[in-house]
Image (cartoon, rainbow, N blue to C red):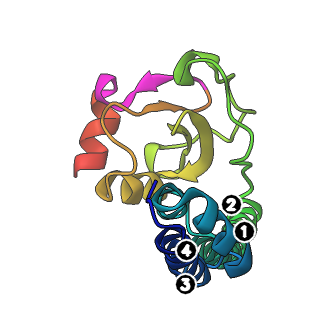
Amino acid sequence: MFENPAVTFFTMILFGIICAFVAHDRGRSPVGWFFIGMLLGCFGLILLLVLPNPRREEEQRRRLAKENQRLKERLHKDRNVADRRHDSTRRRLRAHDQALGVDTEERLESSPAQAIPPPPPADAGPLQGTLWYYVEEGEQAGPVEFTELRRLYRRKRVLPTTHVWQEGMGDWTRIEELPELKEALDG
């Protein structure tokens, strides 16, 4: 390397000291890197600069762990809120179902109008006093009196295309196919 052993020794010590300071700053052993810097010179310094910084990696790992913990807690909290809302909604729907005497949790798997069997017989009477059954969202609803059916019709919950049935009818029929009923509902 150099002709003068003192210069060579001084250069080795200098690279050792530089590597020790850089190693200390980067979270590595200054003593170990002092000797590596002495033996490898500038290659030791380059190697030290190329290696990842363990302090930064540890800091990033801690930050990610803290963020993961925060996200887990938030997810847990959000799930609890969603579960409470879901349970509350189910309780309210069950209460409504009980009050109306229907079961909206069971769904029919076939087409709405043809799959619904005729309801049990109801008392026949004039149009105003007749009990009507209707299909809502693929399920049989009713019986309701004509006045309630008219109210549902005006609120657009029952449409001209809605299938209805009453005692004495052969099958479910759309309101628009029953001119007398449609006229009474429109009136």
Q: Are marks 2 and 1 in contact (CB under 8 Å)?
A: no
**Crowding near the residue tagged with mark 4, few <14, some 14–19, many ≥20 C-alpha atoms within 10 Å:** many
| Segment colored magenta | 168-178
Residue highlighted by disc 1:
83
- Residue 144: image tag: none
- Residue 21: image tag: 3
Classify 171 as above or below 41: above
Separation of marks 2 and 3 at Cα, in angstroms: 81 Å
Amino acid type of the residue that numbered disc 2 sits on in the rendered structure: Leu
Residue highlighted by disc 2:
100
Q: Secondary structure at mark 2?
A: helix
Amino acid type of the residue that numbered disc 4 sits on in the rendered structure: Cys
Q: Quadrant of residue 67?
A: bottom right
Q: Secondary structure at mark 4?
A: helix
**Crowding near the residue tagged with mark 2, few <14, some 14–19, many ≥20 C-alpha atoms within 10 Å:** few
Residue 99 covered by magenta stretch: no
Residue 177 covered by magenta stretch: yes
